[in-house]
Image (tube, rainbow, N blue to C red):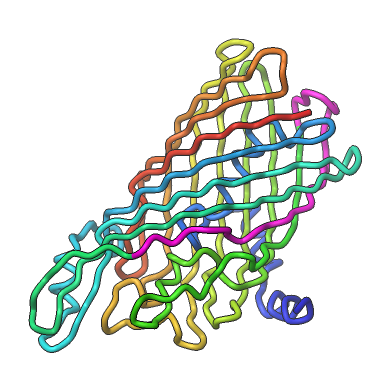
Amino acid sequence: MPSIYLKNLIKKPFLALFILLIVNSNQVHALGECGLACCLAGATTSGATTAKNFGLVVQYEYSDMETIRHGTDSVSPDDVLNTFWSAGNMYVVPTRMTMEKLSFIGAYPINERWQVLGIVPIQRNRMDMRMRNPAGMTMNMTMDTISGLGDVALLGQYIAYTDAPIRPTERLTMGFGVKTPTGKNNERAANGNFVHAMMQLGSGSWDGLFTINYMKANYPFVTQINAFYHLTTEGDEGYEFGDQIGLDLLFRYQVSSFVNLGLDFNAIHTAKDKDHDGQYSRPAVSMLDNVDNTGLTSLFISPGIQYKIPDTGGSVELKYQHPVYQDVRGYQQVLDGRWLATVAWGW
């Protein structure tokens, strides 16, 4: 398995793209429009990654997806049905999807420079759909909920520069790691077909992860830049999510010793998916099961508030992500909003 993983990594010009990410970045998706980027951003802003002995972050995400876009235009589910349905055939479109994720993130410092970060996600995906049958009748239906362990990720982070070991005013961290195929990716519907790829708990692939974080503090203001690149590979069932790039610009204002107000700007971009074996593709009957309807660029604004628990290494943060720009390939159901609640503790 490791040799196959390395071979897949070499096939792609990841080094050039990684340099591009640093200079002019843009996203993330696969299993949701945020992927691992939200977890990493939550960990770095919580302070748990600067813990002396061990840092723990528990983050809950609730994503609501209802709007369907064609390019940048909003269209209704019935618009899509009228475009792609034909007499004698069936066609299905999503009307609403909710994705919940509970992530456990542990940060362990090996020494003054190196740190290991582990991410364990538990996911719950639900979807409502609208179907037009061969006779032209339209009806609503709900898919069975899919929940369980997602894909576990492990990263090593290197502190390339810091001006102080505790409460630094400037810090540069670089990381690399791997996303493992621990989440189930072969859930099937009652008819025996694979459930939509984006509804699966995992991707079935070993993927490369690369991160850069720069923090600059001029108290009471703190600014951070997070860059994230997810190098995807083909899963064991033949599906390959598009490579993902993300960029976060994070601003924090220290209102008091225990309260920080935050405002984030997030850019996300994903490339087109590939279904090498055709097991997830049914473009003639389903909007979701068509790789031509994959790949997007989105911009978000995310206000939040953080409370640091006095005399402890703990903090609580609440954030809301709101899309301000979305451009998709083909027809896609996009994120309407995401709530993120984070509890962090450092020892």
Residue for point 53% across, 55% down? 35
Q: From the top left corner, tell me how far across and down residue 329 is, in percent.
A: 36, 68
Q: From the top left corner, tell me how far across and down residue 25 is, in percent.
A: 57, 53
Residue furthest front in the image:
190
Please tell me which residue lies in front, 8 or 341: 341
Total label count?
0
Residue for point 46% across, 54% down? 124
Please tell me which residue lies in front, 189 or 12: 189
* Residue 139 figure quarter: bottom left
Quarter the C terminus occupies: top right
* Residue 85 figure quarter: bottom left
Q: Is residue 280 above or below residue 48?
A: below
Please tell me which residue lies in front, 37 or 92: 92
Residue for point 67% across, 73% down? 13
Whether 219 is among the magenta residues is no
145 sits to left or right of 232: left
Residue furthest right in the image:
111
The answer to whether residue 203 is visible is yes
Q: From the top left corner, tell me how far across and down residue 33 is, in percent.
A: 46, 55
Specify the segment rendered in magenta: 144-170
Q: Is residue 180 above or below residue 250?
A: below
Whether 166 is among the magenta residues is yes
Q: From the top left corner, tell me how far across and down residue 8 is, in percent.
A: 68, 79
The answer to whether residue 25 is visible is no
Residue for point 48% across, 58% down? 147
Quarter the N terminus occupies: bottom right
